[in-house]
Amino acid sequence: MLIIGKKLSPYALLSISGLLATSDQAVKWLVQQSMAYGESVSVTPFFNWVHLRNTGAAFSLFANGGGWQRYFFIGIAVAVSIFLIKLILENRHKGEAIAYSLILGGAMGNLIDRVFRGYVVDSFDFYWRDWHWPAFNLADIAIVLGALLFVSGSFLGKKTNTNAESDGSD
């Protein structure tokens, strides 16, 4: 069974990561096949479907770094992915493990881009009037959701554990 008490099977968690990375790559492939670079399609009054490239980090930080950032971010993504796989295999608490799985899936999706394309494909552009949030992709969403889940679990876990006795299962 995939769920064991408060823990999930590491194989289920790694499958979630793989599904996220695969879905991210499918969306990026669709964008590259159906849109010219720089093209923008208005979907709603606050959302555009776009085809952009990001050679930098989040919010295009270091995008004009001259190329060193590609290998730096590949190294970071590989190191973080190995660490997250180790944590997932240790079969942490369910909420924590799902957070690691989401972050790993997003990191792998963007890692694949950096290795094979040299840049990350972004396709989601949310805006209000003339102000645009930096474009992002499905991998970025997974990373942010995983980080939020981890942080919220940390706060909630500390609050609930301070009044409860440990049963030794942590």
Image (cartoon, helix red, strand yellow):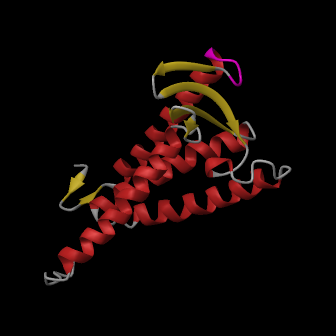
Q: Which residues are magenta?
A: 34-38
Image-quadrant location for residue 118: top right
Q: Is residue 143 visible?
A: yes
Q: Is residue 118 left or right of residue 144?
A: right
Q: Position of residue 101 (x, y in %)?
A: 42, 53
Image-quadrant location for residue 30: top right
Q: Is residue 61 left or right of residue 103?
A: right
Total numbered circles: 0
Image-quadrant location for residue 155: bottom left
Image vertical order of residue 38 relative to residue 154, above or below: above
Residue situated furthest right in the rendering? 66
Question: Which residue is depicted at the point 22% across and 53% down?
Answer: 3
Residue situated furthest top in the rendering? 34
Quadrant location of the C terminus in the rendered image: bottom left
Q: Is residue 91 visible?
A: no
Image vertical order of residue 168 relative to residue 66, above or below: below
Q: Residue 128: say if magenta.
A: no
Q: Position of residue 17 (x, y in %)?
A: 45, 46
| Majority secondary structure of magenta residues | loop
Q: Position of residue 64 (x, y in %)?
A: 80, 48
Question: Which residue is depicted at the point 52% across and 42% down?
Answer: 139
Question: Which residue is depicted at the point 28% across and 60% down?
Answer: 94
Question: Which residue is depicted at the point 53% across and 32% down?
Answer: 124
Image vertical order of residue 108 relative to residue 24, above or below: below
Residue situated furthest front in the rendering? 129
